[in-house]
Amino acid sequence: MEQKACMSLSFSKLNFSLWVVILFMIFSQADSYDPLDPFGNITIKWDVISWTPDGYVALVTMNNFQMYRHIMSPGWTLGWGWAKKEVIWSMVGAQTTEQGDCSKFKGNVPHCCKRIPVVVDLLPGVPYNQQIANCCKGGVVASWGQDPALAVSAFQVSVGLAGTSNKTVILPKNFTLLGPGPGYTCGPAKIVPSTVYLTPDRRRKTQALMTWNVTCTYSQLLVSKSPRCCVSFSSFYNSTITPCPSCSCGCHNKKDCIMNNSYKLKSAGINTPRKDNVPLLQCTHHMCPIRVHWHVKINYKDYWRVKIAITNFNYRMNYTQWTLVAQHPNLNNVTQVFSFDYKPLVPYQSINDTAMFYGMKFYNDLLMEAGPFGNVQTEILLKKDKDEFTLGQGWAFPRKIYFNGDECHFPPPDAYPNLPNSVHSDFFPFLTTVTSMFLLVLLII
């Protein structure tokens, strides 16, 4: 009996441990799961295009398959660890940030001898002999939903002291990606079917000698424990403006903030970004770099109109190729969008309630730093679904707002602008008053 009891206890402990492991795996994956872009990721593909006497030449392509999260300036930074004592003989379209100790080499000196190389994209305008297709954009990569043609970056690397065949190559490990800051987690490299290429005349197919992929996913929790944007509300039927909640993005920067009328704003270099990307925020009660304001503007018979304004409160940051994502049930019937580009997002084919907005090229695709020009705005005309449309209970306000792929902090539901209580209760007294005045006029006549 004692033996059976011990066995039962051991099994229970094992069962409990398994559940802990399973739950940990689920929640660790959930951190990087985005319900509005469930298949979004950055895939880094290595194609071995030739063998060399002591290694191989690989074309490395970074595809951003995220619908609304792009990599903005100062661009991506990619790192990995070599499995053995590999070196990088040369690179085209990118460079490592450090060469490392190459003192044991005589004659030809490698481009990089570090065990953990860190690679960055080249800047635009480098000589043509240092370029390849899709390189040299300063690490800036558009989102897939915004511009698929610009959602790619590439470079070529020649690796030495490595395997020289499919059986002897050992894949790099421990990949890291900054885009430009933290947030991405990369999985291990996995061998996949070799990439097939078409010749320029599209009459012949060639293929890579070997291909492996690395998939990187984004988690907002890895960037900051606090949100990086907030949402405020207003409406035509209520004079009260619902502001962003106090300290929506944390108040840790409050001691270093600047008032919007401070003499410090006239100092030289006030708008120059720092290498550590520490913001210089305008002093506000919410202390967010970005505020998105949603205003219910007009209610027509068959349509209603919304105004959206995005304001930048960071004096050290302007946002190129910014994106705004909104979730609302009536976004399935957008009639017109003014001054923004618009694209519906349908990650789940049966649900069409999410839309991506972004600036028009060369017009407002750049959100300037904090100040008089640090804002962009649009108006959206939506056709009513008469079975659903209502101005009551906050229905006219969005369910979620994302700016540049980060979810924004909302006010509490009980603070949303409400329909005045007198809308219905005062109607009949008003009608009675009008009727009485009309009768009085008739008696006078």
Image (tube, rainbow, N blue to C red):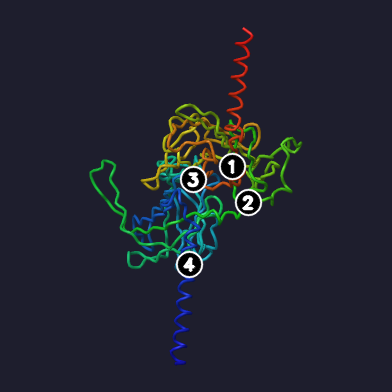
Instruction: Say which label, 1 or 2, has the lower sequence index.
Output: 1
Residue underneath mark 4: 23
Q: Residue at x 39, y 66 (%)?
A: 170
Q: CA distance from mark 4 to mark 1?
A: 33 Å
Q: Residue at x 47, y 83 (%)?
A: 10
In the image, which disc is placed on residue 112? none
Mark 1 Cα shell of 10 Å, populated few (<14), some (14-19), many (≥20): many
Instruction: Pinpoint residue 43: horizontal percent, then vertical percent.
Output: 41, 53
Residue underneath mark 1: 231
Residue underneath mark 3: 70
Residue underneath mark 2: 276
Q: CA distance from mark 1 to mark 2?
A: 26 Å
The quarter in which the N terminus is drawn is bottom left
Circle 1: residue type: Val
For residue 286, above or below residue 218: above
Horizontally, is 356 left or right of 270 in the view?
A: left
Instruction: Say which label, 4 or 2, has the lower sequence index.
Output: 4
Instruction: Say which label, 3 or 4, has the lower sequence index.
Output: 4
* Number of the front mark, 4 or 2: 4
- The reply to whether discs 1 and 3 touch (Cβ–Cβ < 8 Å) is no
Q: CA distance from mark 4 to mark 2?
A: 35 Å
Q: CA distance from mark 3 to mark 4?
A: 31 Å
- The reply to whether discs 4 and 1 touch (Cβ–Cβ < 8 Å) is no
Circle 2: residue type: Asp
Q: Residue at x 54, y 41 (%)?
A: 393
- The reply to whether discs 3 and 4 touch (Cβ–Cβ < 8 Å) is no
- The reply to whether discs 2 and 3 touch (Cβ–Cβ < 8 Å) is no
